Amino acid sequence: MSLSTTKGTTAVLAEWAAGFRLEAAPAVVVDSMKAKVLDFLRVVTVGARLPWSRSARRLTLSLGGTGDSTVLLFGDHLDAARAAFVNGAFAHACDLDDTHVGSMHHAGASILPAVLAMAERTDASGRELLEAAIIGYEASLRIGLATQPSMFNRGFMSTSSCGALGAALAVGKLLHFNAEDMAGALGAASSYAGGLAQFYHSGSVIKRINGALGAESGVMAALLTQQGIWGPRDILEGEAGFFRAFSDACDPTQVTAALGCEYRLLEVSAKIHAGAGRLQASVDAGLSLGSEHGLTPEQIVDVEVGIPQVIQGRLTHTDPHDLQSAQMSVPFSLAMSLAIGRERGARAGLRREDFESALVAPEICALASRVRCVLDAEVEAGTNTEEVPSRVTIRLVDGREFVARVPHPRGSPHRRMSWDELGALFEDTVAGALPAGRVAQVLGLVANLDRDTRARRITAAFVANPDWLKVE
């Protein structure tokens, strides 16, 4: 498919989305998207029973109504927009969902809930689901890259803004939109775009539903367009459009360059640790040091961690006051990993429960206060659209010093988990949640998305044991 070189950015993106077919994507892209669907189901399982997830589901159910789309694990049936909201809340509930460093965006939590909800409503095939998901990821990541880091510096969040636009295109694909309607859906979705980053500074719980907002907004924008309520078809580049509203220094070529030839979704990282994407390498380094040297927090008198400038002031606070701020703190997460490494080894993953325990552990809080974040030229040079490396130096009571360097965090594109590794992680996570036999069934359905699976078969199989759902 040849793309117009004379049309605006919105039209080029819409034209590509309308014409995209799964057979045009390289096998590595298709396999990567199947892996992202499986990882999405993993993180939904982790997030579904958390307090804010239960609140989001309870509120949505209280609003009434039924539909053709399933709330994952619980089996409730809602309209597509509300099902996308709840499942997006589950996915982003623990900050374990996939992430893209350059666009500062969690595509899985905003795109896949919208795709699954609408694919179920339309009884889409697995191939159609994959087509829509690839479009949603690619569009939202590219729009994020075009506006970052200015968008973040101005206080806006990609997941609820760029995610809404990508989800609208993905849903539009499932509704068989032509290029004109795709552009109109982008315009409509921009009216929903938003989400502010003040929580980095003063806390709150609202970040937990950024994925939910992006997913729901995308569904609504596409359905509005289907009913003739469309938005400006030059919404990205327009004089009062998305680029100018959300960024002081945008680069529209990030959206259109090599579109359909190079796939940004291959740059997305799966997370091992339940925290911000930019602290994953520092946690890996801390676990390695703690494991290798059998360290306790009291042995460590000083910790220096090299960081890039982009996280300074946002992920560098040493005294988080709640779970969310702890998951956004390099010093606190690093202190935890140094302590946990001794008992659980270098291959451990930080869980939500680890953060909650650490917040009331005086020795870890004290160690976090001894962590110094310093701008590091080597780390800055290694930071790119795919990952943030780390360098951690510790000094012990006896004067010894140790250094750990992690150029590529686990789960990142340069240390990507294989399908077998992801499958094992999925099996471990959902053990006890799904009835016997369902785990293998879901694995098989996702593995065969490009062959004979239908979306409804996945959502029907991914319903939890009643006893598991009752656990508070």
Image: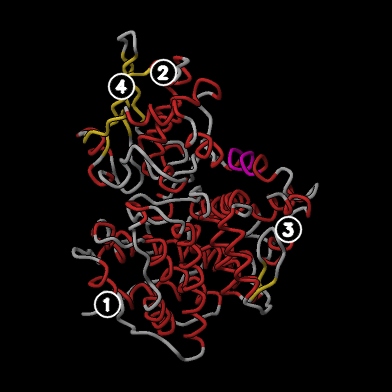
Q: Which is the main secondary structure of the residues drawn in magenta?
A: helix
- The residue under the point 41% across, 38% down is 280
Magenta region includes residue 164 = no
Quadrant of the image occupied by residue 229: bottom left
Labels 4 & 3 near each other (Cβ < 8 A): no
Which residue is under mark 2? 298
Out of 226 and 61, give the one closest to the viewer: 61
**Given the image, on which type of amino acid does mark 1 rest?**
Gly
Q: Secondary structure at mark 4?
A: strand
Q: Secondary structure at mark 3?
A: loop
Alpha-carbon distance for marks 4 and 1? 48 Å
Q: Earlier in the sequence, mark 1 or mark 3?
A: 1
- The residue under the point 52% across, 49% down is 94
Out of 365 and 150, give the one closest to the viewer: 365
Alpha-carbon distance for marks 4 and 2? 10 Å
**Given the image, on which type of amino acid does mark 2 rest?**
Glu
Q: Earlier in the sequence, mark 4 or mark 3?
A: 4
Range drawn in magenta: 420-426
Labels 4 & 1 near each other (Cβ < 8 A): no
Name the mark on residue 463: 3
Alpha-carbon distance for marks 3 and 2? 45 Å
**Given the image, on which type of amino acid does mark 4 rest?**
Asp
Vertical position of residue 220 compared to residue 347: above or below: below
